[in-house]
Image (cartoon, grey):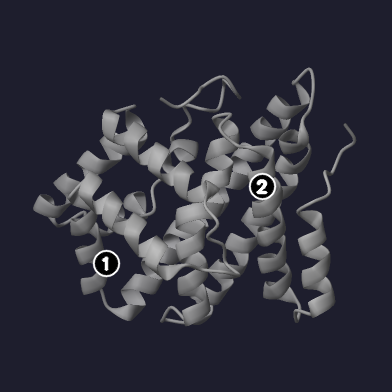
């Protein structure tokens, strides 16, 4: 079972709960307003995974946390492992296979618009909830490494989504980079926020995922260099606060 001993006022927030779901369910629901049979399936998934603490939600959360802790990263993607987890998720709930089928049938422009709407809604929620997150951290009696890094991670993640939103607005088709980044966003980097809120985030995982996210954001705005990559690698081994 997932621990709920962390940020008590936030762990039941529907947006934070939705961060374990690797599909844009809310955005899909808006696209399906005229399709009564399809919308019933998606509404059921939103109820099970966002609005209620069902057994399916708990099982999916454990699976996504396991993937977040794995050695898979944006720099060293393991496509077979990601595919394996994708199949596990479909086995957990056949409705995810239905959602994949729905997205695959969309035109490239509609698919791009779907993800753009999802990303923009996520950015809006992140910005709106940031004040509450900072307040909760400030109210803690003692800080650990995760607490010291979390707001920076939160802001980096928001910045990454903003760069993706700009790319999606410029094009009617998902390019290869955006497709790869969206996959890692959905399966790993947004799950870090969920794990912190739920007090399920190991400090070593935070350091590793923080350095990876920092490198992705730097690459989105600047040309990468071996020196910068080496610097980010060093960050993985240096705690940001003294013991």
Closest to the observer, 210 or 103? 210
* Residue 126 appears left or right of 48: right
x then y, percent, for residue 202: 63, 37
Describe the element under mark 2 as helix, strand or loop: helix
Q: Is residue 39 visible?
A: yes
Q: Is residue 59 left or right of residue 148?
A: left
- 152 relative to 76, above or below: above
Is 211 above or below relative to 107? above
Mark nearer the N terminus (2 vs 1): 1
Residue 211 image-quadrant placement? bottom right
Res 29 seen here: no
Question: Residue 103: which numbered mark, if any?
Answer: 1
Locate the C terminus and report the quarter of the image it occupies.
Answer: top right
Task: Tell me the crowding category of disc 2: few under 14, some 14 to 19, or many 20 or more residues within 10 angstroms, Cα based.
Answer: some
Q: x, y (%) of residue 40?
A: 15, 45
In the picture, the quarter occupied by the N terminus is: top left
- Vertical position of residue 136 compared to residue 69: above or below: above
Identify the residue shown where x is 51% and y is 46%: 191
The residue labelled by disc 2 is 154
Mark 1 and mark 2 in contact (Cβ < 8 Å)? Answer: no
Q: Is residue 45 above or below residue 98?
A: above
The residue most toward the left is 37
Residue at (24, 44) in percent of width and height: 92
* Number of numbered discs overlaid on the protein picture: 2
Q: Quadrant of residue 33?
A: bottom left
Q: Secondary structure at mark 1?
A: helix
Per the model, the C-alpha gap separating discs 2 and 1 is 28 Å
* Residue at 40 percent of width and 38 percent of height: 61
- Which is more toward the observer, 172 or 80? 80
């Amino acid at each position: 079972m997932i621990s709920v001993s962390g940020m008590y006022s936030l762990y039941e927030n529907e947006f934070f709960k939705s961060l374990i779901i690797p599909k844009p369910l809310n955005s899909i629901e808006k696209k399906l307003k005229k399709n009564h049979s399809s919308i019933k399936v998606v509404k059921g998934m939103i109820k099970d995974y966002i609005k209620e603490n069902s057994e399916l939600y708990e099982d999916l959360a454990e699976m996504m946390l396991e993937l977040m802790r794995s050695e898979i990263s944006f720099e060293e993607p393991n496509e077979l492992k990601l595919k394996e987890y994708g199949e596990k998720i479909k086995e957990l709930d056949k409705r995810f296979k239905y959602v994949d089928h729905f997205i695959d049938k969309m035109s490239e422009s509609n698919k791009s618009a779907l993800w753009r709407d999802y990303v923009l809604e996520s950015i809006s929620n992140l910005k709106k909830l940031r004040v509450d997150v900072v307040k909760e951290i400030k109210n803690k009696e003692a800080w650990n490494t995760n607490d010291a890094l979390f707001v920076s991670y939160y802001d980096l993640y928001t910045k990454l989504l903003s760069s993706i939103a700009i790319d999606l607005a410029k094009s009617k088709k998902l390019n290869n980079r955006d497709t790869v980044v969206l996959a890692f966003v959905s399966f790993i980097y947004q799950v870090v926020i969920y794990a912190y809120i739920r007090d399920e985030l190991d400090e070593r995982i935070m350091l590793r995922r923080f350095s990876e996210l920092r490198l992705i954001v730097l690459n989105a705005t600047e040309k990468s260099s071996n020196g910068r990559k080496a610097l980010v690698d060093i960050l993985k081994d240096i705690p940001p606060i003294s013991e």
